[in-house]
Amino acid sequence: MSTDFEQNTAWIRRAQTDMKAFLEGLAARLEGDMPGLVEIDRKKDGFFAKTSHVEGITIHTENNDYFLKQAGAHLSTVRAKVVRGVVLKHENLPLSTWLESLAKDLADLSGEMQGASRALHDFLMG
């Protein structure tokens, strides 16, 4: 039993370390790839520190806002249904479900933007 406990706590420590790296990587990727649609909340590592870490990520899509927040070892992922700038519903989701929903909404948004780009191109060139 002791060995199982030690293995479980080791996996938890590893997951927490991996999550910090995941947040930093996700924030950098989203911030660079989708300016204007992503907000990154950073917190300084200390009063005089030059370094900071990602504390939260907000992604705005056509129909939903996605919030990812880390507070210590706790990670929360929320999808908010937004209509004309008004939040109608908040849903706490598991990370995997949150990522799947975000990927779907980003694919939908990309498709809409591609269609608009084609229509504008055809209009101007036509």
Image (cartoon, rainbow, N blue to C red):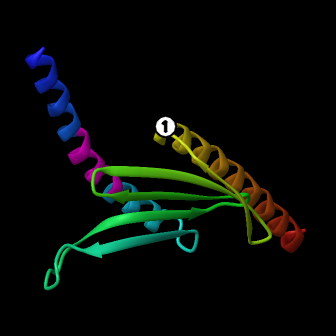
In the image, taking residue 21 as reference, residue 92 lies left or right, namely right
Task: Please give the name of the residue rendered at 13% of the width and 85% of the height, measured from the top-left corner.
Answer: 48
Give 30 or 114, whichever is nearer the viewer.
30
> How crowded is the residue under tag 1: few (<14 C-alpha within 10 Å), some, or many (20+)?
few
Task: Please give the name of the residue rendered at 82% of the width and 69% of the height, measured from the top-left corner.
Answer: 120
Q: Residue furthest top?
A: 1
Q: Position of residue 121 (x, y in %)?
A: 80, 67
Q: Is residue 20 above or below residue 99?
A: below
In the image, taking residue 103 as reference, residue 17 lies left or right, namely left
In the image, taking residue 46 as reference, residue 16 lies left or right, namely right
Q: Position of residue 62 (x, y in %)?
A: 72, 61
Q: Which residue is mark 1?
A: 96
Q: Is residue 67 above or below residue 77?
A: below
Q: Quadrant of the C terminus?
A: bottom right
Give 31 or 71, whichever is nearer the viewer.
71
The disc labelled 1 sits on which kind of residue?
Ser
Task: Please give the name of the residue rendered at 30% of the width and 74% of the height, measured from the top-left corner.
Answer: 43
Q: Position of residue 75 (x, y in %)?
A: 38, 50
The stretch in magenta equals 15-23
Q: Secondary structure at mark 1?
A: helix
Choose top left, top right, bottom left or bottom right for residue 44: bottom left
Residue 27 located within the stretch drawn in magenta: no
**SS assignment for the magenta stretch, majority:** helix
Q: Position of residue 90 (x, y in %)?
A: 64, 55
Choose top left, top right, bottom left or bottom right for residue 7: top left
Q: Is residue 20 above or below residue 55?
A: above
Count of all numbered marks drawn on residues in the image: 1
